[in-house]
Amino acid sequence: MNPYIVKSDLRFNDLSVDRATAAKRFGGGVIAGRRWLIRALSFLSTAIFATTLEATDNISVLGNKPRWNVLEHYQQTITRDEFAHLVNDVYGTQGFAPDLIEIKGDAARILINRDAQKFFTLRFAGSKEEQKNVPRLWRPAKSLPSAGPDKPLAGLRIALDPGHLGGSWAKMEERWFQVGDSKPIQEGDLTLRVSRLLATRLRDLGGKVSFVRSTHEPATGKRPDDFRELARKILIRNGVPQPRAAVLDQTDPEKESTIRWQSEILFYRYSEIRRRAAQVNFRLHPDLVLCLHFNAEGWGDPNSPNLTDTNHLHMLVNGSYLAEELEFDDERFEMIRRLLSRAYDEELPLADTIALAMARETALPPYAYPTTHSTTKVGTSGYVYARNLLATRLYRCPVVYCEPYVMNSKDVFARIQAGDYEGSRNINGVDRKSIFREYADSLAEGLADYCSRACK
Ligand SMILES: [Zn+2]
């Protein structure tokens, strides 16, 4: 009856709201009545489009065919114990079909393709001492030469990824709301503003900063119209035999079943983030990516949004793949490659340290996900979760995905309206630093803390 559609899938929707609240926002309450049995588009195989003579590739939406031979470079770079720990406690915490990854005595057997019954064999190192070097382009902070206490980030290549597009795309992205006649809140504009302040601070600390996005212009050259045919096929495959072309209006309860709406999300999320990943992996080659976001609670009608008293902070690192996600040949391959790169060893303590610095300055409590079915709490700070987002999976280096501040909390809303300023101002009866500077300063401080310690 009701189709299984993309936007329902918050796995790729970085807003860390629970599904009920999200449903309220996206569907004005209409979707909330649906059971979230919905097999979202991300779980939808594109197998119908990609077939070979021998076997069908089971690839996720706009995904790339995995190159399993790359993993040959990781032979004997990890012990059995460490591999099992990373699978059991970080990446595969939601469970998966037993034939996908089998850990044996001295090797793991990883499924390449089920139809063809093809497997990749990863041989373990006999001990830590016998481990071969992990091949990778990024460098852990502790491997960089120290340049003194004033420059804790010396030599570190940091790419800033301000979340979303903002500008004229903000309404399409559903990252826009407006209270009365006040200035509209557009997440993509806020993150860009933070990234510019942050770049200055990180450079002062010795970091080499690049931008994954520095304007409102999409990285992808595609536009929604380019995805109309794919959107139509996806809808048909998911039980909408004759999908409508257009969305009637913002409150259209069936908007998710329209070709327009589906092709837009294929553009601004799937295509855009995959294009950003190509820039990170093939052009920027950073040691670290910081994904900058503002969080939100369900705001309902964007023209008459709910403001809340709730405000919180959390960080995400890659992990906690769903069983359905690991069924995809490309996602399973990307997960294994990421695991073997040991990005987790760097991004987890980094996320913990940044979270603690931001918590000190913002006094925000940790966000608590309403369910453990998609995320896994990791680390020691209480603020960090593992979750499989496109950006945290595809950027081939440590990635810390920052989700401070609930944009539609009364406090944050007032602080955003106040704009950026020097010093402090009285907002809602309290003297506050500009929210943009607080974000940038505390994040930079956390990163400096981590690198100062790592270099000792
Ligand atoms: Zn965001």
Image: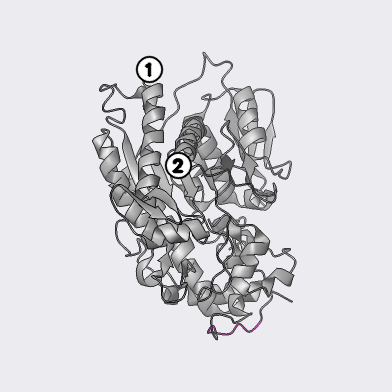
Question: Residue at horizontal 45%, vertical 42%?
Answer: 399
Question: What whole-number distance in Å separates the C-alpha atoms at marks 1 and 2?
Answer: 22 Å
Above or below residue 130? Residue 227 is: below
Q: Identify which residue, 334 or 315, lies in the foreground.
A: 315
Q: Quadrant of residue 441?
A: top left
Horizontal and vertical percent position of residue 331: 57, 49
The residue carrying mark 2 is 399
Horizontal and vertical percent position of residue 370: 68, 51
Residue 119 visible in the shown view: no
Q: Amino acid at mark 2?
A: Val
Q: Amino acid at mark 1?
A: Lys
Characterize the magenta stretch by its predominant secondary structure. loop
Q: Secondary structure at mark 1?
A: loop
Q: Is residue 33 left or right of residue 273?
A: right
Above or below residue 165? Residue 251 is: below
Membership of 207 in magenta stretch: no
Q: Which quarter of the rendering shows the C terminus?
A: top left
- Which residue is most to the front? 429
The residue carrying mark 1 is 456
Q: Is residue 285 left or right of residue 390?
A: left
Magenta part of the protein: which range?
A: 241-247
Q: Identify which residue, 388 or 437, lies in the foreground.
A: 437
Tag 1 and tag 2, C-beta contact below 8 Å: no
